Amino acid sequence: MSALTFHGNDSGSLVFWVREIEIALSAGQIYDARAPVAFALSNLGGRARAWAMARGKVTPGNFNSWSFMEQELRPTFLLQW
């Protein structure tokens, strides 16, 4: 499985990155609940990676599911109109 790296600089790319992660996860037929989070985290870079690592230090195990991680990413990296 592979996906592009999301750096958090361009909010428009978050939607495409999330979709790419979901496609890779469905193609990989992952059954372990924590594996999607690990895969998504491994495809973060720059500001987005720093944000995720800081969240993990404050609340260990913070991202316990892909859906929760996605919900947390959206308000942080999508532009608010």
Image: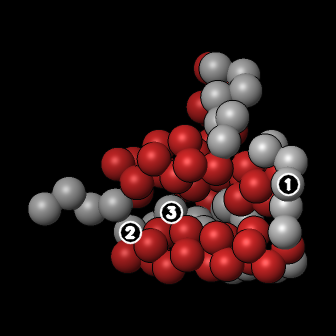
Tell whether 38 sits left or right of 74: right
Distance in Å between CA atoms under marks 1 and 2: 29 Å
Which element type, helix, strand or loop, lies under badge 2? Answer: loop
First in residue order: circle 1 vs circle 2: 2
Q: Earlier in the sequence, mark 3 or mark 1?
A: 3
Q: Please give the label number shown on residue 61.
A: none
**Splitting the image into 4 quarters, where does residue 53 fall?**
top right
Disc 2 marks which amino acid?
Ser
Report crowding for label 3: few under 14, some 14 to 19, many 20 or more residues within 10 A (C-alpha). Answer: many
Disc 3/disc 1 C-alpha distance (Å): 28 Å
Percent x, y of residue 46: 63, 60
Q: Which residue is mark 2?
A: 11
At label 1, counting other C-alpha atoms closer than 10 Å, the crowd grade (few under 14, some 14-19, many 20 or more) is few
Q: Secondary structure at mark 3?
A: loop
Q: Which residue is identified by label 1?
A: 31
Q: Position of residue 30 (x, y in %)?
A: 85, 61
Question: In which quadrant is the N terminus drawn?
Answer: bottom right
Q: Are marks 1 and 2 in contact (CB under 8 Å)?
A: no
Residue type (three-letter) at the residue carrying disc 1? Tyr
Q: Which residue is mark 3?
A: 8
Circle 2: is it few (<14), some (14-19), or many (20+) Cα within 10 Å?
A: some
Query: In the rendered image of this protein, does residue 22 appear above or below residue 58?
Result: below
Q: CA distance from mark 2 to mark 3?
A: 7 Å
Q: Quadrant of residue 23?
A: bottom right
Residue at x-position 55% and y-position 69%: 18
Relative depth, front residue between 9 and 41: 41
